[in-house]
């Protein structure tokens, strides 16, 4: 399963390599802007007063010649997961894969839209290992080194839950 999904994601980001590319779509431009904001330094989750939890750090970078975003997420210095996401130009949707620290993998699709200057909404659904719930989230740029992240999950059984807002500060 791992190899098949990795091959599928690689095919998504390398399809058409070397050919003349069409003009980027609105989603591709939004994805590029979102990625450009996230890449550079490490984003550190800020705990609210009285809140306890692990130190969470997220590092984003462009991968595969700038066609794919890679996130390495750590808790207390240990890798929790690695995420790869790219926009498939054939269907104008994002394909993503999360590889967990213990070897598990989840694959799905997503869409991203710009809702205001410095604010992006993502809609995400899980496809493998089995179809799962969906969630939407909103990333808001507070300034160049601070973001707010919040969202809503819808489980397979239809139960909804909201989370956030969570604040991250960029350390360089």
Image: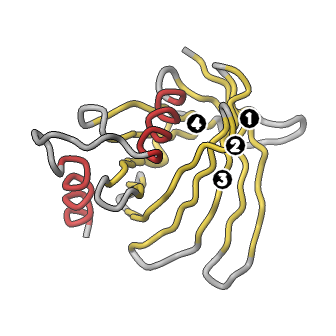
Q: Earlier in the sequence, mark 2 or mark 1?
A: 2
Which mark identifies residue 167? 1
Q: How far apart are marks 3 and 1 (CA)?
A: 13 Å
Quadrant in which the C terminus is drawn: top right
Residue drawn 79% across the image and 42% down it:
52
The residue at the far bottom in this view is 157
The residue at the far top in this view is 172
Q: Earlier in the sequence, mark 3 or mark 2?
A: 3
Residue drawn 63% across the image and 29% down it:
44
Mark 2 and mark 1 in contact? Answer it, CB < 8 Å: yes
Q: In this view, does 120 lie above or below 161?
A: above
User: Residue 7 sits in which quadrant?
Assistant: bottom left
Q: Name the residue under label 4.
A: 76
Q: How far apart are marks 4 and 3 (CA)?
A: 24 Å
Q: Name the residue under label 3.
A: 137
Q: Is residue 127 above or below residue 146?
A: below
Q: Mark 2 points at which residue?
A: 149
């Amino acid at each position: 399963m791992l190899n098949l999904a990795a091959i599928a994601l690689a095919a998504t980001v390398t399809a058409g390599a070397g050919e003349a590319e069409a003009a980027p779509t609105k989603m591709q431009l939004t994805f590029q802007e979102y990625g450009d904001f996230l890449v550079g330094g490490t984003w550190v989750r800020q705990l609210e007063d009285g809140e306890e939890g692990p130190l969470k750090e997220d590092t984003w970078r462009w991968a595969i010649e700038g066609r794919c975003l890679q996130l390495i997420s750590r808790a207390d210095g240990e890798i929790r997961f690695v995420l790869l996401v790219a926009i498939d130009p054939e269907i104008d949707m994002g394909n993503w894969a999360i590889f967990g620290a213990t070897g598990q993998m989840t694959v799905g699709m997503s869409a991203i839209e710009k809702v205001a200057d410095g604010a992006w909404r993502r809609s995400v659904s899980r496809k493998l290992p089995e179809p799962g719930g969906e969630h939407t989230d909103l990333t808001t740029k507070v300034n160049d080194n601070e973001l707010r992240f919040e969202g809503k999950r819808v489980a397979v059984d239809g139960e909804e839950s909201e989370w956030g807002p969570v604040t991250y500060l960029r350390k360089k």
